[in-house]
Structures are given as structure tokens and as C-alpha cells.
Amino acid sequence: MSSIRFKVLSYNIHKGFSSGNLKFTLRQIKQSIQQIQPDLVCLQEILGYHEHHKKHFPQHPHFSQPEYLAEGLWPHLTYGKNAVYPKGHHGNAILSRYSIQFWENQDISLNSLERRGMLHSILKIPKLATPLHIICIHLGLFETDRNYQINTLCDRIRATIPNNEPLLVAGDFNDWRKVASAALLNEVGLTEAFLEFQGSHAKTFPVWLPALSLDRIYYRGLKLENAICLKDAPWSKLSDHAPLFCEFLISKNKTI
């Protein structure tokens, strides 16, 4: 076999609550993700700690949400703390079947009210000649902020990721006007998976009637095999976003 198949899920879990914060759904989120068994999970709006939730929701784990979701299937994880408040903090997380050689969380916030970050991890996959780079990201609500954050993402890619090493960038881009993909393709050669596979960005928000294409999976140096937006049951009742699921092939000897 000359290639390795690699499954990726990107998901804004809304801190473990359904749309409108009507129901605490973290246990169902864990079960649903485990059923499709991705090799890599990129999560946004995930709680590292919250004092209130531990006291008021019996199903809330006594350890962090990244640790809880990773338990039993993903032995390696990184968590990037972005928003900090008196009762806790949340950010982005990466769960991986494969060992993480390096990680760094970069603050890309532009104001104190909307804390954002991008979490960069480097994975070592057995029999793969080069490392695999993963960036889990959550961009701001305002277009001027997003433009700055996309430029910052491009700067990081150019400065830290060689062109011959495969790269995935996944997360909540809040890019309802669909302008990020052209910039990322032109500046750093990133292709958006659903735009490539289906001809349009996946509609992921709100999950009960998806109308906006906010979530994305971009790639470089891999071969896209499949791209699915998981917006039906059980996903339609777990968060306010629908998750994205993709399958890729990575050449063992060189990037594709």
C-alpha cells in the first residue's frame, strides 16, 4: 500500500450544549464522534474548565472536556485556551490517534470581548516520510477581524510549514460571505474540501436549518477522497453547528 487513509472531523461543539443551550449534550457528542472513528478531531468552543457546569450538570465530567472526549480512542491531544473568564475557559482542541511532536497555540484576538486562537500541532504518522501539520482555528465574527486573522494564518504557514509537508486547516471560519477560500488558495495553496468535492461550501449553521457556510476543512499535500456534512440525526440535536467529515490519502513517500 503506497498511501495512508486518514479520517478527519471538524466540529464546533458549542461548549457541549445543543442549539439555544437547551440541553447538555457532551456525552452524546462523544458517542456520536466515536461511532465514526476519525483519526483526527478538530474541536472549537470546547471547555477546558467551568466551575458552574460541574455544579449544575450531573453529566458533566470532573476533568476537562478535551480529556473526556479523547478518552478511549484518541491517546494524544492538545488544547489551546483562548477565552478566559472568572468561572472557566474555553478554546480549540485537537484529538489524535497519532503522536503529537509539537504544538503551539497562537492568540489571534483583536479585542478583549472576542478571544480567538489557532492551535498548530505536528503529528508523526508511522511510515509517513514527512510530518502532518494540523491547524485548528476559530475566526472572529467581524469581517475586518477575519481578514487580519486569515493573513496571520497565511504568515504562520509560510514561516513554519515547508511546502513538501502535508497540511490540514480546520475549524469555524465564520466566513458567511465565502471570501476566505480564494485568499487561502492564492496565498498558501490551500484547497477547501467541500468546494473541491461538491462544488460549494458545506452549509453548517444553524444545524436545525443550515443556511450559512461557516465551517471549513482546507488541505494541501493530500488527496481528498470524501467530504460529508453531518447535519442529520443525531448531529442535528447536539450543537448549533453541523460537523464536517473528510477522508484523505497521504502518500507514504512524498506528498500528493
Image (tube, rainbow, N blue to C red):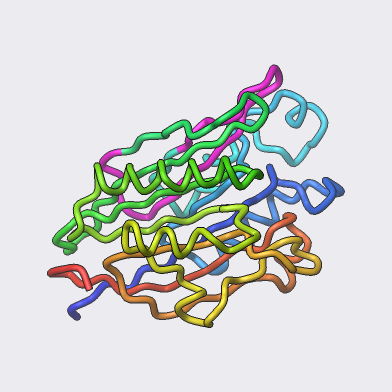
Q: Which quadrant would residue 90 be assigned to in this image?
A: top right
Q: Nearer the viewer, residue 196 or 238?
A: 196
What number of labels is visible?
A: 0
Is 27 placed above or below 46 here? below
Residue at 50% in and 58% down: 180
Q: Which quadrant would residue 254 be assigned to in this image?
A: bottom left
Residue at 32% in and 76% down: 223
Q: Which quadrant would residue 127 be assigned to in this image?
A: bottom left
Q: Quadrant of the N terminus?
A: bottom left
- Residue 245, image x, y percentages: 52, 68
Is 38 placed above or below 87 here? below
220 to the left or right of 182: left
Residue at 66% in and 37% down: 61
Main secondary structure of the magenta stretch: strand
Residue at 74% in and 51% down: 25
- Residue 155, image x, y percentages: 33, 43
- Residue 130, image x, y percentages: 17, 57
Q: Quadrant of the C terminus?
A: bottom left
Magenta stretch in the rendered image:
79-102
Is 70 placed above or below 37 here? above
Q: Nearer the viewer, residue 51 or 208?
A: 208
| Residue at the extreme top | 86
55 to the left or right of 195: right
36 to the left or right of 209: left
135 part of magenta stretch? no
- Residue 65, image x, y percentages: 60, 39
| Residue at the extreme front | 144
Q: Nearer the viewer, residue 48 or 211?
A: 211
